[in-house]
C-alpha cells in the first residue's frame, strides 16, 4: 500500500466539516480558535480553480486564488496553513487535500462529482491513486454510505488500498437528509474493518449539541475522529471544551475576522443568518437582513467603531506598501493632464435602491443626444484596487481614490462627472424626474455573487459591459 510521505495526523481529532458558503476563512479561523484540530474548506468546482491566479495579498497577509472576474474563490492565511484541508488539488498553501464524494446536492452530482462518484468505484480508485502518487500532501476522501453494508465495506476497502491517509464517512446514504437518523452502526463497521483513521460525520443535532457529545458520537461509531458540520455552523464554539459561548459573543468574533480578512458581506451575512436561526425575526435579525454592506453588518452588532478602525488600518497598510513599491501605482493609460479629478467614493446607502450615479449619467447623455459614457478601468496589482475614468462629450473624469471593485470605481467616476457638471446624481432627497420615465435598472451590488466573466485581466484596461447576476439563496449545505 502506498503511504504519503507528509502526513497530517487524523487520529483523535475534532474537525470542521466542508460546508458550501460556510467554510470560508472567517469560519475556519473561528473554529480553530475554539479548539478544532483540522478545518476543511468548502467544496470548490475544479474548473473554477483551474482558472484562478494565485496572488499574495500583502495588505491582508493572505494568499488569494482569484478568478478571471476578480472574484476571490479561495483565501487562506498562515494561521491555518498547517491545519486546513483543501477539497481540490492545490498543495502549496494547505496541509491536506480531500476529495468530496459525499455531497448529494445537484450542483455537485450533475457534474459527476460529490456523491455521484460513489456509483463508479473504478473512477474513485483512479482519482485517489493518482492524487496519492502526485502530491506531497496527505490525501483523504469523504463518502456517504451505500444502501447495503456489504457494498459499503467493499468500497471502503478499495479506497484504503489507494494509499489515502484517512476516510470521512457520513452515516447517511445519498438520498437521505438530516431528518433521517445517522447510521452509527455502519460507521462502526467501517472503522472496525479499516486500518486507516475513520472520521465519523453526520451527528449534528441528533447526537451533537454540545462539546461533550462529540466524544460520545466518536465512541458510538468507534471512529478515530469526528467531523462536525451543522452544529459548528450554528455555533462554532461547539469545539470549545469549556462549553458553548453566548451566540452574541461568537457572532461578534466571526464579524471581526470577516472584516479583517475582507470577506464579502453577502457571505458574512449568510453565515450569521445560519447562526441566528430562529432569532432572524428579532430586532437584530431584522437589522442583519437589511444590511447591504460589511459596515452595516458591523453597525447592526455594535461594531461600527471596530469597522472604521480596521478599514483605516488596512488603508494605512496599503498606502505603506504603495510607498515602498511606487512602480505598482498604475494610472489609467491616458494623458491625465486633461482629466477632471475629485476625491470621491460611492456610498450605496446614500442612494435609493433602484437608482445609481451611472444610471443618472446615462439618462442625461441620452437626453442631450450625446454618445453613452465610456468607462475605462484598471486594477492595481499590489492590492487589487480599481480606478476608473469615464469619458463624456470628449471630457474625462476620475476619482483620485481607488475602490475595491470595478463596479464601485465606475460609479465613483460617474459621480465626478455629474458633480463637476452640476447635475443630479440620484442621491436620496434629490429630484430627477427624467429617471421615472424609463425602466429602472437593478441596484448595483458589491462583487461576490456569480458574475459573467470578463476577458480583461488584472492591470489591463477594462471596458463595458459588466453584468451582475443574482445569486441563489438556496442552502447548498451537505446534510451533515
Image (cartoon, helix red, strand yellow):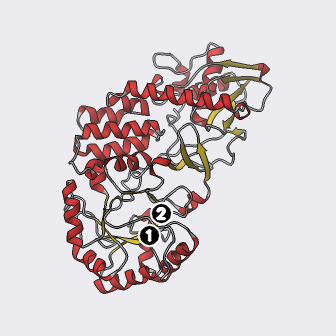
Q: Image quarter for residue 40?
A: bottom left
Is the residue under label 2 in contact with that under label 1 (CB below 8 Å)? yes
Label 2, residues with CA under 10 Å away: few <14, some 14-19, many ≥20: many
> Which badge, 1 or 2, comes first in the chain's sequence?
2
Residue that appears at 56% across and 34% down = 404
Between 140 and 414, the one lying in front of the other is 140
Task: Find residue 259 and report its horizontal and vertical position in percent.
Answer: 44, 36
Q: Image quarter for residue 367?
A: top right
Task: Find residue 281 and report its horizontal and vertical position in percent.
Answer: 24, 38
Answer yes or no: is residue 384 visible.
Answer: yes
Between 153 and 441, the one lying in front of the other is 153
Between 366 and 328, the one lying in front of the other is 328
Checking the image for residue 28, the label placed there is none
Q: To which residue does mark 1 refer? A: 140
Residue that appears at 50% across and 44% down = 448
Task: Find residue 213 and report its horizontal and vertical position in percent.
Answer: 19, 59
Answer yes or no: is residue 388 visible.
Answer: no
Q: Is residue 75 left or right of residue 395?
A: left
Q: To which residue does mark 2 refer? A: 96
Task: Find residue 161 and report its horizontal and vertical position in percent.
Answer: 45, 82
Amino acid at each position: 500500500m502506498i503511504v504519503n510521505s507528509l502526513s497530517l495526523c487524523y487520529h483523535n481529532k475534532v474537525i470542521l466539516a466542508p460546508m458550501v458558503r460556510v467554510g470560508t476563512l472567517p469560519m475556519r479561523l473561528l473554529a480553530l480558535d475554539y479548539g478544532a484540530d483540522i478545518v476543511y474548506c468548502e467544496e470548490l468546482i475544479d474548473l473554477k480553480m483551474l482558472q484562478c491566479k494565485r496572488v499574495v495579498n500583502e495588505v491582508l497577509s493572505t494568499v488569494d486564488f482569484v478568478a478571471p472576474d476578480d472574484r476571490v474563490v479561495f483565501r487562506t492565511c498562515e494561521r491555518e496553513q498547517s491545519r486546513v484541508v483543501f477539497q481540490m488539488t492545490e498543495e502549496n498553501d494547505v496541509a491536506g487535500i480531500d476529495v468530496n464524494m459525499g455531497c448529494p446536492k445537484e450542483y455537485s452530482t450533475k457534474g459527476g462529482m460529490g456523491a455521484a462518484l460513489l456509483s463508479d468505484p473504478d473512477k474513485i480508485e483512479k482519482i485517489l491513486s493518482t492524487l496519492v502518487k502526485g502530491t506531497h500532501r496527505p490525501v483523504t476522501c469523504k463518502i456517504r454510505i451505500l444502501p447495503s453494508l456489504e457494498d459499503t465495506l467493499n468500497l471502503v476497502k478499495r479506497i484504503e488500498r489507494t494509499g489515502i491517509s484517512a476516510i470521512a464517512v457520513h452515516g447517511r446514504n445519498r438520498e437521505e437528509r438530516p431528518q433521517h437518523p445517522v447510521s452509527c452502526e455502519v460507521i462502526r463497521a467501517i472503522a472496525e474493518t479499516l486500518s486507516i483513521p475513520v472520521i465519523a460525520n453526520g451527528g449534528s443535532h441528533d447526537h451533537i449539541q454540545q462539546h461533550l457529545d462529540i466524544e460520545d458520537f466518536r465512541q458510538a461509531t468507534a471512529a478515530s475522529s469526528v467531523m462536525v458540520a451543522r452544529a459548528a455552523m450554528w455555533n462554532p464554539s461547539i469545539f470549545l471544551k469549556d462549553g458553548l459561548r453566548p451566540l452574541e459573543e461568537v457572532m461578534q468574533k466571526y464579524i471581526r475576522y470577516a472584516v479583517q480578512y475582507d470577506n464579502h458581506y453577502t457571505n458574512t451575512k449568510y453565515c450569521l443568518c445560519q447562526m441566528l436561526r430562529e432569532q432572524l425575526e428579532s430586532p437584530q435579525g431584522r437589522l442583519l437582513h437589511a444590511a447591504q454592506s460589511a459596515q452595516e453588518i458591523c453597525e447592526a452588532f455594535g461594531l461600527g467603531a471596530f469597522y472604521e478602525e480596521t478599514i483605516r488600518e488596512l488603508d494605512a497598510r496599503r498606502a505603506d506598501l504603495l510607498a515602498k513599491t511606487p512602480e505598482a501605482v498604475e494610472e489609467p493609460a491616458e494623458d491625465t493632464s486633461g482629466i477632471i479629478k475629485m476625491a470621491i467614493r460611492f456610498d450605496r446607502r446614500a442612494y435609493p435602491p433602484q437608482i445609481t450615479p451611472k444610471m443618472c449619467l446615462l439618462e442625461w447623455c441620452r437626453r442631450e443626444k450625446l454618445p453613452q459614457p465610456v468607462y475605462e478601468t484598471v486594477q492595481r496589482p499590489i492590492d487589487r484596487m480599481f480606478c476608473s475614468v469615464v469619458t463624456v462629450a470628449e471630457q474625462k473624469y476620475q476619482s483620485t481614490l481607488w475602490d475595491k471593485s470595478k463596479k464601485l470605481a465606475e460609479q465613483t467616476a460617474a459621480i465626478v462627472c455629474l458633480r463637476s457638471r452640476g447635475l443630479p446624481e440620484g442621491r436620496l432627497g434629490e429630484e430627477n424626474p427624467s429617471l421615472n420615465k424609463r425602466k429602472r435598472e437593478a441596484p448595483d451590488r458589491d462583487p461576490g455573487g456569480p458574475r459573467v466573466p470578463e476577458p480583461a485581466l488584472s492591470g489591463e484596461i477594462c471596458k463595458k459591459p459588466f453584468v451582475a447576476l443574482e445569486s441563489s439563496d438556496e442552502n447548498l449545505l451537505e446534510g451533515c
